[in-house]
Image: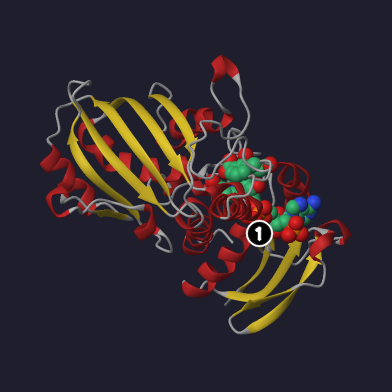
Amino acid sequence: MGYRVAIVGATGEVGRTFLKVLEERSFPVDELVLFASERSEGQRLTFKGKEHEVKALSKQPSFRGIDIALFSAGGSISKEFAPKFASDGVVVVDNSSAWRMDPDVPLVVPEVNPEDVKNFHKKRIIANPNCSTIQMVVALKPIYDHAGIKRVVVSTYQSVSGAGAKAIRELEEQTRAWCEGKPLPEPKHIARQIAFNCVPHIDVFMDMDYTKEELKMLNETRKIMHDPDLKVSATAVRVPVFYSHSESVHMETKKEISPEKAREVLSKAPGVVVVDEPSKKEYPLAVNAQGRDEVFVGRIRKDLAFEPGLAMWVVADNIRKGAATNTVQIAELLVKEGLI
Ligand code: NAP
Ligand code: 3JM
């Protein structure tokens, strides 16, 4: 038996990756309905060798008959349309930040808190965490279970694809202009010049001069790990990389855990690949994680500031594990648990 699956934001970076991941993982799709803005109406996208026409979301009178909808069209579309889908009987898995902190909406990373998925009945919405949070919690969970974690200090090195298709073009255009010796076009989709630069500004500034992206890493991690006391201090930085986010993660653990033991528990953890042979120049790299679904962890070592503590380097494809793959894994959980 298959499902009637809708994709909202089908023409975007994440939306197109939904199509690939659903196909690769043989998700049981009986029928596919693709939505985007009116700008994309009539565009055709291929799924399993067959073309599907994109519909304008705003022109759709009803969503009845759809079993599950995967959303990636930004927070305001999710806020407006997820409840409409839900009241038409659809289960929504949403990629935006719109619903993540709602106490009636589960926030799920299947390797970390799969049991939460079943608590979606009040709103019929399940939230997919932020890309930077997802890869961090997949790497933290095995250490948390083994030694406990008191606090985390993380700096991110986030690729431009996290800001959508237009930000990818912005890096290309600035780089091309620089190579041709021309003046760089004004930044539009990333706060400042991104070519040959690092920009410590992702999403908007909030309380205490932290960005919303940095506070997502604190609040979402606490919700996913069910630990409101866990302290997370983040600096989120956009770097001139096209795909995959990298993170430097330093943590104070509750009990001593050696780097050898951490390597062992991480090697056995679901969705994690340990790449950690510095003498052979083997450590996780953004260019190697691109197109993969796992979270890569390396540079595992004792932290020199936290006692007891650990430091590590965590890399994953932000559009796949950070967005599309995690969402499809949530849909798979719903199927496995008989919830749709
Ligand atoms: P993108 O490449 O800019 O694509 C945006 C998509 O949203 C396009 O399909 C676009 O359709 C559609 N859209 C925009 N306005 C719309 C409207 N009024 N009605 C219907 N569809 C509309 O962005 P992306 O990288 O795919 O990301 C999309 C969203 O996913 C983000 O805004 C974010 O909320 C979420 N996201 C989450 C993560 C995560 O960490 N889990 C990572 C990346 C993105 P058109 O082509 O017709 O404009
Ligand atoms: C990743 O509403 C918007 O403009 C989307 C902003 C956005 C988000 C978000 O806040 O939903 C872009 C890229 C995310 C995210 O995953 O939090």
Q: Could you say which quadrant of the image residue 88 lies in?
A: bottom right
Q: Where is 340 relative to 241, above or below? A: below
> In the rendered image, which quarter contains the C terminus?
bottom right
Residue at image mark 1: 12
Could you tell me if residue 89 is visible in this image? Answer: no
Rendered residue at 31%/39% (across/down): 140
- Amino acid type at circle 1 is Gly
Ligand number 2: quarter of image: top right
> In the rendered image, which quarter contains the N terminus?
bottom right
**Where residue 187 sits: x, y (%)?**
66, 41
Q: Where is 24 relative to 192, above or below? A: below
Rendered residue at 77%/49% (across/down): 81
Q: Could you say which quadrant of the image residue 150 lies in?
A: top left
**Where residue 135 sits: x, y (%)?**
40, 46
Which residue ends up furthest to the front in the rendered image?
181
**Where residue 291 sits: x, y (%)?**
43, 64
What secondary structure is found at the residue carrying circle 1?
loop
At label 1, counting other C-alpha atoms closer than 10 Å, the crowd grade (few under 14, some 14-19, many 20 or more) is some
Q: Is the residue at mark 1 in contact range of ligand 1, meaning its CB lies under 8 Å from it? A: yes
Q: Where is 187 relative to 282, above or below? A: above
Q: What colour-coding does the image apply?
A: secondary structure
Viewer-nearest residue: 167 or 36? 167
Q: Is residue 168 left or right of residue 144?
A: right
**Where residue 258 sits: x, y (%)?**
12, 35
Which residue ends up furthest to the top in the rendered image?
208
